[in-house]
Amino acid sequence: MEIWLFYLFAAIALISAVNVLAQRRVFYSAISLIICLSALAGIYMILEAPFIAAVQIIVYAGAIMVLFLFVIMLLDPFSAGVLTNKRKSLTYLGALLGTLLLTLLYTLLRTFQQSRVPRFADRTSDGYGSVRTIGEILFKEYLLPFEATSVLILVAIIGTVILAKRKI
C-alpha cells in the first residue's frame, strides 16, 4: 500500500512541477507549485516524518506561497504586456538542461545500492525526530536564532505592506 501511495504522490508532484514550467500565466504556475509542495508533504508522511510534512504544508505551501501570490497579484500579471512570450529562445536550452538532469538522475539511480541505506527498527522509540524532541531542542538550545528569525519575518511583512500601500 505504501509503495502505491508513494507512486501516486510522486506522480502528482512530477506532473505539477512540469505544469509549473509549462503554464503561460504566472498565477497558474503558482497554483501548480502549491500542489507540488503538498504532494511532497504526502511523501514525507509516507516516510514517517510528520513534523517535516507539517512544516512543508504550513511554511512552504502556506506562508511562502501566499507571499508569492501576493507579489504576483501586486505586479498585475494579467495585463497584455506581460503575457507576451519573450523566452522562446530559452526553450532549447531548457530542453538540453532537462535532458542532462534526467540522464544524471538515471545514472545515479542505476548505481545506487539498497544495502547502503540504514534501516531502523522503530524510529520513534527513542523520540528521535518526534515533534516533542524537535520542539525541546528548538526552544532550549536555539531560542535566540528562532526569535531573531521571527523578528526578521515580521520586518519583511511590515515592509511588504508599506510597499503595497505606496502609489506607483
Image (cartoon, helix red, strand yellow):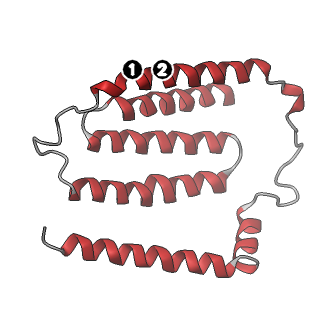
- Inter-mark Cα distance, 1 to 2: 6 Å
User: Which residue lies at the image location 73% right of the left edge and 68% below the top edge?
Assistant: 132
Q: Position of residue 156 (x, y in %)?
A: 40, 73
> Relative to residue 145, is residue 31 depicted above or below?
above
Q: Residues within 10 Å of mark 2 (few under 14, many from 20)?
A: few
Q: Residue 117 versus residue 74: which sits nearer the camera?
A: 74
Q: Residue 49 versus residue 68: which sits nearer the camera?
A: 68
Question: Which quarter of the rendered picture does the N terminus lie within?
Answer: top right
Q: Position of residue 122 (x, y in %)?
A: 86, 47
What residue sits right under mark 2 in the picture?
Answer: 96
> Relative to residue 1, is residue 28 depicted above or below?
below
User: Which residue lies at the image location 82% right of the left edge and 54% below the top edge?
Assistant: 124
> Relative to residue 146, is residue 115 depicted above or below?
above
Could you say whether the residue bearing mark 1 is in a helix, strand or loop?
Answer: helix
Amino acid type of the residue tagged 1 in the rendering: Tyr
Q: Is residue 159 left or right of residue 145?
A: left
Could you say whether the residue bearing mark 2 is in a helix, strand or loop?
Answer: helix
Q: Position of residue 40 (x, y in %)?
A: 56, 41
**Mark 1 vs 2: CB contact within 8 A:** yes
Q: Is residue 32 left or right of residue 75?
A: right
User: Label for residue 92?
Assistant: 1
Q: Residues within 10 Å of mark 1 (few under 14, many from 20)?
A: few
Question: Which quarter of the rendered picture does the C terminus lie within?
Answer: bottom left
